[in-house]
Image: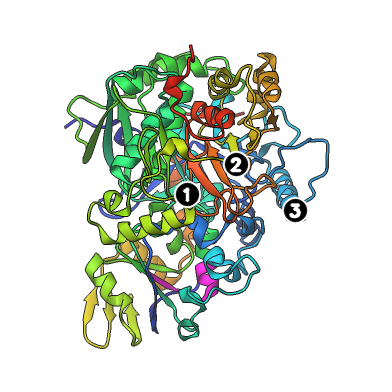
């Protein structure tokens, strides 16, 4: 019987295989950041262990860095200590660090691909659940906890139970690909399969609707695999993948010979068997807006806020969850999504802060102003994205429209730095999680695409961006 | 890591589904560089109001559960962020067993690294346990939960069971495979980053 792409990558990385129970899997790339690593380095020190392969390990600071002027000191003492701790750990253990002043600094899942560190067919881990982003390149990439970070630092391996392969086919063509984006595709998927729908699996996204996407859009899709509960999500590499990685700063010297190998090997066999399947037809999908407190609580922009009964389809616990979510979000069933007014707009995060996201959003706002009741900000995914955007004049378009234009980092996606919502504030956000308090205690998050966020910024409420001319 | 063999206590019922790790320990507490002391941040936004006074309607603020070591929650517990701080907070607060119909993958794995036993049971059994007012005993060796009226068996992977029972250091275990790892590295075609 044939193998899926995931199974091929898995099999190629088994160091110690067992019939039952976990296998020891080799890790090709380990990305490290300031929040989930200090305790791991401490563990190494306590046990007199060293980092086995510093040459496969890369660090940056992204989660709690301020996005204001990099010349200023970090006011938050605990953030500052965490950042200094990473600097010291990288120095002590010989790990390459892109620090706060590096032109390569940025969200770890944005810089990995941009620098050519992410490679097809490789295993990539990071102490961050959105590591699934790198799956867009046909890598097996997943988030791990801090104990596992320590384990990888010490041994370059992990004990893992083999997840099950899950095929998600995205079929058809979007009528307006500028208005209906990769974000809308992945939110539609999560809406359908649920936030636990992918638990225990690695998703392979396939079909015309995926092949049509650019690499940056594919990253948006794979990024949110974890929001469906999947261990990882991946997409078979193609010419777009190989073109994207060619000639980047850390692209391997023998890249072309690797490409030849990948072309032969990195695809699911025709007779491969997936344990689970789901198909999404995208010909007629609408822009999506989340209304609740998890990414599965999402609907079309043309719809109204659902009743808990409609949402739960008879499941009592889901119904209770929906009631609580509506209460937290201060929304009434039956309210048209387009009538929901917002206070803040955040364009950023490892889901949607790449150059293409900023280009698309800038088209929506060009020559217009942010609604006077709204405060809007753009936080580029990396300093490199920021620089490229500035070279194209995008910063000017955003600032002319009264958007704040910031330095790179995770920022208000998780609100560990000063960029947070105040209690009760409602935000149109291009990030990945609308959990209670995620963007600030008491803050209310609606997940949308960059163009939907930009349109909401201008109008002060959600609008169906398909009505706008984006070409 | 401390070995885990058996625990007996009343259960704390947390009647919620899809409890994400942002709720278990909110982001503002992730800046610490040590593993200890996270218990006071557990379920912070559910436990305390804006003035940091305890909310009387939240289960952890009911003193009858003060010595509970067993949390019984809804489906998909621990979803979202990979933060192990969530497990450190549960453990530091005093929980050593979490029972739910299902767990998110990363959270599930993080539990075993810290001596916490996560047990998945059928929804109907979980709901029954949430109603249990007497102490229950969770016996890992025999894979059974004993309530005042019944014995409920549970499944656990044998490797994970051994790790918990013996309190094994994962990394030390892995170092026993040094030859295999070195051999793998010799054959690997994936180049170094730098």
Q: Chain of mark 1?
A: B
Mark 2 secondary-structure assignment: loop
Q: Quick one: label 2, few (<14), some, or many (20+) residues within 10 Å? A: many
Question: In this figure, which residue is indicated by the disc labeled 1?
Answer: B178
Asked whether the beta carbons under mark 2 and mark 1 sit within 8 Å of each other, the answer is: no
Q: Nearer the viewer, mark 1 or mark 3?
A: 3
Dot 2 corresponds to which residue? A343
- Disc 3 target residue: A81
Residue B97 on the magenta span = yes
Q: Quadrant of residue A409?
A: top right
Residue A191 sits above or below residue B22 on the image: above
Say which residue appears at 38% left-offset and 34% top-offset.
A186
User: For this rendering, which residue is in front, A271 or A1?
Assistant: A271
Residue at 53%, 38% in the rendered image: A428
Question: Which of the two marks, 2 or 1, is nearer to us in this view?
Answer: 2
Eyeballing the image, is A235 above or below A434?
A: above
Q: Is residue A52 left or right of residue A208?
A: right
Residue A316 picture quarter: bottom left
Task: Name the secondary structure under disc 3.
Answer: helix
* Region of the chain picked out in magenta, as a range: B89-98
Q: Position of residue A195 (x, y in %)?
A: 36, 48
Per the model, the C-alpha gap separating discs 2 and 1 is 56 Å
Q: Are marks 3 and 2 on the same chain?
A: yes
Residue A457 on the magenta span:
no
- Going from N to C along the chain, the mark reached first, 3 or 2, is 3
Residue A339 or B82: which is nearer the viewer?
A339
């Amino acid at each position: 019987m044939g193998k899926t792409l995931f199974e091929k990558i898995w099999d190629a990385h088994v160091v110690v295989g067992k019939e039952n129970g976990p296998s020891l899997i080799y890790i090709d790339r380990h990305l490290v950041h300031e929040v989930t690593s200090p305790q791991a380095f401490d563990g190494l020190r306590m046990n007199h262990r060293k980092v086995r392969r510093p040459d496969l390990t890369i660090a940056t600071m992204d989660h709690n860095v301020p996005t204001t002027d990099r010349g200023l000191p970090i006011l938050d003492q605990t953030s500052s200590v965490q950042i200094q701790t990473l600097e010291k750990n990288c120095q002590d253990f010989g790990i390459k660090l892109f620090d706060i002043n590096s032109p390569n600094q940025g969200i770890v899942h944005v810089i990995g691909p941009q620098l050519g560190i992410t490679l097809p067919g490789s295993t990539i881990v990071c102490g961050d659940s959105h590591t699934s982003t790198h799956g867009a390149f046909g890598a097996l990439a997943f988030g791990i906890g801090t104990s596992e970070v320590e384990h990888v630092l010490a041994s370059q391996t992990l004990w893992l139970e083999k997840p099950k392969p899950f095929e998600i086919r995205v079929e058809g063509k979007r009528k307006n690909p500028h208005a209906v984006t990769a974000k809308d595709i992945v939110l539609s998927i999560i809406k359908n399969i649920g936030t636990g729908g992918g638990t225990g699996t690695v998703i392979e996204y396939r079909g015309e609707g995926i092949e049509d996407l650019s690499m940056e859009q594919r990253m948006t899709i794979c990024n949110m695999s974890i929001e469906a509960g999947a261990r990882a999500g991946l997409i078979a590499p193609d010419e777009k993948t190989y073109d994207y990685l060619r000639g980047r700063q850390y692209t391997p010297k023998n890249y072309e010979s690797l490409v030849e190998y990948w072309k032969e090997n990195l695809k699911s066999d025709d007779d491969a068997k997936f344990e689970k399947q789901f198909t999404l037809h995208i010909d007629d999908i609408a822009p999506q807006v989340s209304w609740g407190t998890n990414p599965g609580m999402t609907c079309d922009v043309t719809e109204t806020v659902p009743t808990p009964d409609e949402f739960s389809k008879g499941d009592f616990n889901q119904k209770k969850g929906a009631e609580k979510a509506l209460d937290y979000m201060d929304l009434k069933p039956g309210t048209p999504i387009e009538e929901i007014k917002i206070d803040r707009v955040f364009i950023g995060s490892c889901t949607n802060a790449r150059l293409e996201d900023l280009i698309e959003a800038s088209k929506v706002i060009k020559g217009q102003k942010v609604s006077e009741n709204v405060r809007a900000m753009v936080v580029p995914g990396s300093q490199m994205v920021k620089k490229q955007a500035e070279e194209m004049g995008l910063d000017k378009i955003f600032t002319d429209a009264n958007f704040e234009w910031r330095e790179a980092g995770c920022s208000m996606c998780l609100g560990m730095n000063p960029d947070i919502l105040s209690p009760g504030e409602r935000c149109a956000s291009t990030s990945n999680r609308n959990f209670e308090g995620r963007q600030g205690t008491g803050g209310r998050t609606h997940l949308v695409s960059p163009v939907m966020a930009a349109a909401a910024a201008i109008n002060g409420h959600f609008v169906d961006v398909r009505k706008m001319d984006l070409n | 890591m401390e070995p885990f063999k058996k625990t007996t206590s009343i259960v704390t019922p947390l009647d919620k589904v899809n409890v994400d790790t942002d709720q278990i320990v909110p982001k503002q507490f992730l800046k610490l560089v040590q593993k200890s002391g996270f218990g006071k941040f557990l379920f912070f936004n559910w436990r305390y109001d804006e003035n940091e006074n305890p909310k009387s309607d939240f289960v952890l603020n009911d003193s009858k559960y003060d010595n509970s070591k067993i949390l019984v929650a809804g489906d998909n517990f621990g979803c979202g962020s990979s933060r192990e701080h969530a497990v450190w907070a549960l453990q530091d607060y005093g929980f050593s067993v979490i029972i739910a119909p299902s767990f998110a993958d990363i959270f599930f794995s993080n539990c075993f690294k810290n001596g916490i036993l996560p047990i998945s049971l059928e929804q109907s059994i979980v709901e029954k346990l949430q109603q249990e007012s007497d102490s229950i005993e969770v016996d890992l060796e025999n894979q059974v939960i004993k309530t005042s009226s019944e014995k409920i068996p549970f499944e656990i992977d044998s490797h994970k069971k051994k790790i918990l029972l013996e309190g094994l250091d994962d990394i030390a275990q892995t170092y026993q495979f040094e030859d295999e790892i070195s051999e793998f590295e010799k054959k690997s075609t994936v180049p170094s980053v730098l």
